[in-house]
Image: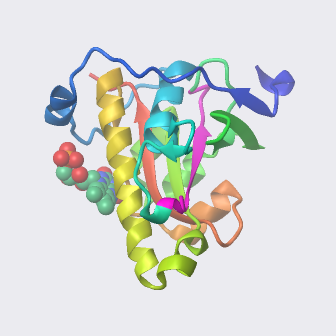
Amino acid sequence: MGSNQPAQIRLPPPQQKGTLSLEEAIARRRSKRDFTPEPISLSQLSQILWAAQGISDTLSEFRTAPSAGATYPLEVFVVCGGNGIEGVADGVYHYNVAHHSLSLHHKGDVRLELARATLDQRFVYQAPVDIVICALYERTTPRYGGRGERYVHMEVGHAGQNIYLQAVALGLATVAVGAFHDEEVREVLRLDKQYKPLYIMPVGNLLG
Ligand SMILES: Cc1cc2nc3c(=O)[nH]c(=O)nc-3n(C[C@H](O)[C@H](O)[C@H](O)COP(=O)(O)O)c2cc1C
């Protein structure tokens, strides 16, 4: 770990069979806001990212969440702090959908700054990992005009629900956070202006 860490991190292949039924996952889903500092494993992260935006059909490259016209406007970032992912250095990572891998965007634990940008929602700092889903609207609006913005917002809901259900199935906790200052989040993650953050989802083990 640390300075020898490769810029690209291959994620373990996602599992497509689990022990919890879909009905149980739906029934148990709840927003949870108390996290232990215990790290999550790379396999757990792999599963969460796959559920959010992973490829589920290698021929068409269609993904786990539906997308208006398969325009795929969402980009997923992973904020890891306090050695929150086993074997992965703290930093901000981008999820490469096509390769199911992570690429280092920049090093360091930015959870405190991220929590400040969410009106001080402390669990954003306490969770070992925050998944940040951003949109690039211009992937969808050329085809659908103004209505494309609505489609992007619907799509992030699909991805968010998949994260919720996958977290339940893994025995992890999460909550969808929509209250934050967009520009501050963008600056903390050092993203270009066209990236619009839509959801922050802290993920970790439940306290208590
Ligand atoms: C669009 C959206 C934004 C939300 N933003 C926040 C938030 O900023 N902070 C938070 O603690 N919960 C947030 N939540 C979670 C809701 O508070 C939660 O879903 C609601 O209380 C119902 O609880 P449940 O998810 O356990 O069913 C958000 C949920 C949605 C759908």
Which quarter shows the N terminus? Answer: top right
Q: Farthest residue toward the bottom?
A: 146
- State the image quarter where residue 84 is shown: top right
Please name the colour scheme applied to the rendered image: rainbow
Place of residue 73 in the rendered image (x, y in percent of width and height, measured from the top left): 54, 62
The residue lying toward the viewer, choosing from 33 and 93, is: 93
Q: Is residue 21 magenta?
A: no
Instruction: Indicate the quadrant of ligand 1 in the picture.
Output: bottom left
Lateral position of residue 99 relative to residue 120, left or right: right
Q: Farthest residue toward the top?
A: 19
Depicted 110 relative to depicted 49: above or below: below
**Residue at left offset 60%, top offset 74%:** 138
Place of residue 115 in the rendered image (x, y in percent of width and height, measured from the top left): 50, 52
Depicted 36 relative to depicted 162: above or below: above
**Residue at left offset 53%, top offset 71%:** 140
Depicted 196 relative to depicted 173: above or below: below
**Residue at left offset 50%, top offset 46%:** 62
Place of residue 127 in the rendered image (x, y in percent of width and height, measured from the top left): 46, 35
Can residue 107 be seen in the rendering of this structure?
A: no
Depicted 3 relative to depicted 94: above or below: above
Which quarter shows the C terminus? Answer: top left
Can residue 133 be seen in the rendering of this structure?
A: yes
Which stretch did the figure color magenta?
70-84
The residue lying toward the viewer, choosing from 163 and 208, is: 163
